[in-house]
Amino acid sequence: MSSDWLFGFKQYHNVPAPSWLNMAMQQILSWPREDVETSEQVQQLNELACNAVDLIVEQGWSLIDMHEDELLRDTAISEARSLPSHTSLRAEFLSDYLGQECNSKVGILEDRGPETSWALQEVDAELTSLCKLLAPITPEALGFTCAGRRKGMVWTPFRDPEEAERLQPRELSDEDVDAGVLQSHLQFIQKRRLCLMRFISNDGGVLELSPRPGNRSRQATQIPLSEGKLLVFRCDEFGFNYKPQGQEPVALTTWIVDTGSKVVQQLATGYFGVDSMQHSEALGILVGPPMPTGYRMHVMAMHAHLPGAALNLDSVECMLTSGTDGFVQIPATRFDIDIYCSIDGEKVPGLSYVRHGAMMSDEEIIHFDNAFFGIREEEVMTISPNQRMILEDGYMLLRKSGFTKTSLNGRQTAAFLGDTGTDWDFTAQIKRLDNPQNPTKATAFGNCEASHWTYAGVSKIVSAGRLSHIMGLRGGSTNIDTACSASLVGVTTAVQALRKATGGQIKSVVNNHGVDAICMGVNMLLSPWTFIGLCGPSMLAVKGRCFTFDVSAEGYARGDGFGGVYIKPSDSDEDYLSQLCCLMGTYVNQDGRSATLTAPNGMAQQACIRESMREAMVTASQITIAECHGTGTALGDPIEVGALRGVMEPRETPLLTTSAKSNIGHTEACAGMIGLIKCVSMVASSQAHPNCHLYNLNPHLDVDGFPSNFDTEVIDTRLNSNYAGVSSFGFSGTNARADVWSQCKSGPRKANTKPDLSKADQVHIRCPVTLGMIEVTTGEPVTKSFRKKKGYKADVLRDEWAPYDISSQAYSGGFRYRRSSSDEPEDLDEEPYILGSWSGWTRMEVMQRREKGVYVAPVILGEVCYEMFRICLEEDLSMEIYPIIKDASSKIWIEGPDWKGGGRYWIIDGRDCDALAGALYEVEFRWHQEVKSISWRHMGASLDAGLEMPAFEHSYMLTGTFTAGHFQEMMQIQSGMWQGSFRLGVTGEEEFQISRDGDINQLIYPAQSGAVRTTVPVRGPDSLGCKKYWLIRGMPSEELTVTLEVVDGHLRVTVASDIRGDKVWESEDGWDRHSYYVYGSWTNWVPVQMIMDPSEPGVFKAFGKVQCLYPSMKTHRGGHVERFYIIVDEDTNLAYYPQLSCARQHEYIVEGPGPNPSALCWQIYCPTPDSRFEIIFDLTAEDRRQRVSWGWPIRGQIEALQGPGLPQIEN
């Protein structure tokens, strides 16, 4: 890191710039003497710390003269000789503590030693003082945060051979490992950053500093030893060899340690096995039901739009917790209450006695951006407000779920909608013609001005389908109408379609093959006729409010509303932590034969609630909150509370009973969804919302002796997690119930957002080489048997400078200690077969056994010079062995055998090494039950080896707008040449691309979508061509011929027209088969192409300059930052980006190529503007953290490297 920052720090602390900066690098600094004034001493200490750090930045070490007196030295030597507490280090640890070739005894200096050891304590205090001085500087200057120092270690020689023999270090034992000795040592060597060595006594000698292997920025150094010196060096960059001279040399050593890897703190995950209690305690759930485990339905996002200007969840929760409602007098824009309503609630036939409702403002239902949804003005005039709200708020729900219009297109997301239809009168749109065509004949609509969009605009059949159509959702689209319970029935249907039955749960009877689902409900009050119809049987409350649970309950009030949830099935810890709630149980049943069609059935309601709780596997006493249907009717409320009591007893804690209808009225088809959203809000805040308009409890409620609470204020559950249930009962007899769980996410009962990793059995992180999960301390791969190690303690110690952040599978060094490893190859009981793209994935070929557990197979590259493959056992595709990503190299972690391959495969790409068609490769597969490996090597030409593979004729297929997404096979007219044709449609435009063997992972396409110019190169075949097509224009019905030529991976696409002649596109070969662009802030986010360094194939470079455009671009440190990520072929949907934003180089795994929806960027920091930097993109790096880097070359290097084609990135 540059020392420029230190000058700013010195100026801030009024520290003068050092005069020795251009002097010899072995400058010895001086510790302030004790005889100076306190203020001056503080100034000198600050200067010392800055100068020491500056030297450490430049050369990796700094030497300080401590000016000690003879009394202190002699006393410290005497105390060191008599130090009672000597320890014997483990033999495997010696080099980490004592360096190389060191033979001495050590003692630990305790924090509170005896009064007789004052001299050593004083020397140790000097080391502590220096640590405190360095602590505020190290984060910016040295790149780590000081977490403190280790206890002082006193070095003294052995008195005699007998003592040396007695204190001979012993080797690590299994008991040491189980006791956590090795775990503690590994944490130390991974966190140590600076070593402080105080030389108390010696007669000279030398200390040798050897740079870490591969560290070219440091040089080996020999530092002469003398008494009264303090050496500070980067122990994470240097090894050392301490060679003192003299009879009894004494030294005191300590280490400054880091707080730990920021990457581990941000990205590591805890593994808690099957112990849900342990996991819950780690999340801070100390009081309340534990977190569920296993495959569950997670509500990942919610959205609600309700009366009272409640446009989002925050405003909805504000309304519910404050106990207000959204009722207003019916506005004239809905209908004229003077015409359609009676006065003072008088019941008059043909009129509504209700003059109020929970209604949204006119702007909320009238304003609609039809252009955003691609709807023409003529059509949008016929679409009811219900459907407009479904589009607007449905898309808002999808955006909150993390999707965009682009990412939604083609996604298998199911849509479920509770909708009882619209009050909007479409007949009012049909105008009678002034000059009818058939004035004497009564033909339906024949003499009126109608539209073919009119029916679709008002029909509830289209409501859910319209959102799926516009967003391109391919999952099922279901509209549900069971009246008041419709939306909650939709949730139950979605859960049944997505979940897996476990234990005693009922098996799903619905399966639409969706990957996730959105569930919505909608209701709009647009016509007086429904009001009038419901007033006839006196179903509505005269006062226009829901007096739920109150003695004055006489009917319900109606309300507008939209609510929706996004449900994702998953068993991953990440989804459990980011979920809003977990849907534990859902159930639907029917009243059957009850008193009347609309009368509630208490026994059926009990059965519905009981079955949902059985599905959730919870008991009555675990349910904290009950969100009731609670319409506020004289008959319904007592029956519902009685049914609730029949299920929720026995219990010791009160059941907190609420209903959202007192706030927003009865939203009918949307009512169940609003109740579910309210439930999630309550359990996520550990509080029950108040009941509005509750003054005197209805005496007909059966609550005597039943511990329940109907409160008018917010009630604290006093739990860190809660269960809650919502009931919704349709007036036609269809009952629905859902039970949810969530940890408290806000308020005084808030649990942790991330688990306390110290309480986990194991801590895992993703390996940057294999991309598989590894144990964070040892780097051991996480396998099924490894997960069974409860309370795992480190049992691996690699070589001295070995990294631990890569998997042992990718580590090529040795081990100082390792418990017996069981990753030796084993013989398979079944025969392994290889299948790949060389046969169009149609033929399986048995692999030959070479030795124990090692199987081989030949692969001959086809005409495109690359092939993909997978492995399976016994020719069974449900027993596939596959890598965890597509386009995998041989280093990627291997899963299987199972059916979860999902089309993932390895790729042998001869284009990287200029291999020609017919090149022979040998694939070698090593089988082990848990740790498998694969590799391949180039064997030359297949003809030279005398090997011939069974012939397979590859096919190439056209796909595009003229095939409606299907594949149209091309004819092979000669070797390496295929031809197909199509006709232009009525618009005179068509788009197309080409697929090898009908495989979407082998597409041939232009570098830019909609390519017309022949200068745009051909790309592929590969998996990056989704939505990239050639655009062909011409005359309608004009026939065009497409010819594809493939020779040794070179592609040539020709489109021939009898009218316009031929257009020819060609590919670029080798590493140029794709272009890479820097997409950064200094270019105002204009892509700038990177150029491959001819001396380093696969390494692309570009230069840039830090700009000084706006004062706001400055950071809090007074410097300047630029941000960037890398895109492929100028396509922002094919990005390489870090795992987290504002990343430094080599900090996080480089993800991609793929969409970067969060615009995650690397951040370049520079203290001064106009500084030039070089960005390097290395596609050959096995460690994916190393793929993107940058440096600060000097001017001459820029001019030398910047050839005629190498871009200089300017603003």
Image: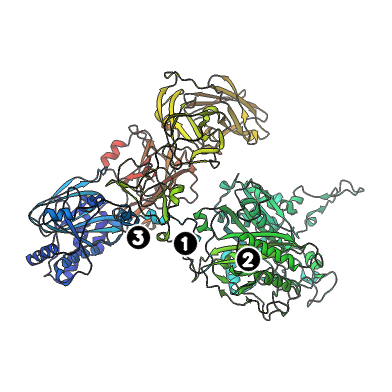
- Which residue lies under the disc numbered 3? 1116
What residue lies at 51% left-to-right and 65% top-to-bottom? 745
Instruction: Inspect this view and state whether residue 1074 appears.
Output: yes
- Which residue lies under the disc numbered 1? 278
User: What kind of element bears circle 2?
Assistant: strand
Q: Name which of mark 3 and mark 1 comes first in the sequence.
A: 1
| Labels 2, 1: front one | 1
| Residue 285 relative to residue 673: left or right | left
- Which residue lies under the disc numbered 2? 725
Quarter of the rendering containing residue 341? bottom right
Name which residue type carries label 3.
Answer: His
Quarter of the rendering containing residue 420? bottom right
Tell me if label 3 and label 1 are in contact, CB under 8 Å. no
| Residue 199 relative to residue 874: left or right | left
Name which residue type carries label 2.
Answer: Gly
Name which residue type carries label 1.
Answer: Gln
- Measured in 3D between alpha carbons, the distance from the residue under mark 2 to the one under mark 1, in whole angstroms, is 25 Å
